[in-house]
Image (cartoon, helix red, strand yellow):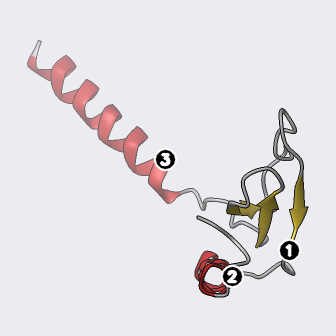
Amino acid sequence: MRRTTALAAAAAILASSAAFARPMPMPQGYYVIRWDNTGVCQIWNTNLQQQPVHFLSDYKVVSKPVPTFTEAAAIQEKMRVSRACTF
């Protein structure tokens, strides 16, 4: 019984370490979009398979793609300060 428990614990540790060892895909870039009806600017990841949902509003891409989220957040903050975006 102890051997089975030890073997199961070792297998669980091995499986969890294998999950962390795999490299995660890095996103290709980010850009800022602005929703028409609210004026809210949102950072969108270009690595996502789907586009933003057009339900009650449409959006415009208001920035060039940038490689990091930090750069996209800086663009979004500049737009908020200049009052081109509301939130």
| Quadrant location, the N terminus | top left
Q: Label for residue 62?
A: 1
| Quadrant location, the C terminus | bottom right
- Check the image and report above or below for 48 versus 40: above
Percent position of residue 15, x then y: 42, 39
In which quadrant of the rendered view does residue 69 lie?
bottom right
Which residue corresponds to mark 3?
19
Q: What residue appears at the point 83 percent right and 34 percent down from the top-left corner?
A: 56
Residue occupying the far left of the picture = 2
Q: For the residue marked with disc 2, what is the amino acid?
A: Met
> How far is the residue under mark 3 from the one under mark 1?
37 Å
The local crowd at label 3, few if under 14, some if 14 to 19, many if 20 or more residues have their Cα within 10 Å, is few
Percent position of residue 75, x then y: 68, 84
Q: For the residue marked with disc 1, what is the amino acid?
A: Val
- Check the image and report above or below for 76 versus 1: below
SS of the residue under disc 1: loop
SS of the residue under disc 3: helix
Q: What residue appears at the point 49 percent right and 47 percent down from the top-left corner?
A: 19
Q: Earlier in the sequence, mark 2 or mark 1?
A: 1
> How far is the residue under mark 2 from the one under mark 1?
9 Å
Q: Label for residue 79?
A: 2
Number of the front mark, 3 or 1: 1
SS of the residue under disc 2: helix
Whether tag 2 and tag 1 are in contact, CB under 8 A, the answer is yes
Front residue (pair 38, 11): 38
Percent position of residue 41, x then y: 70, 65
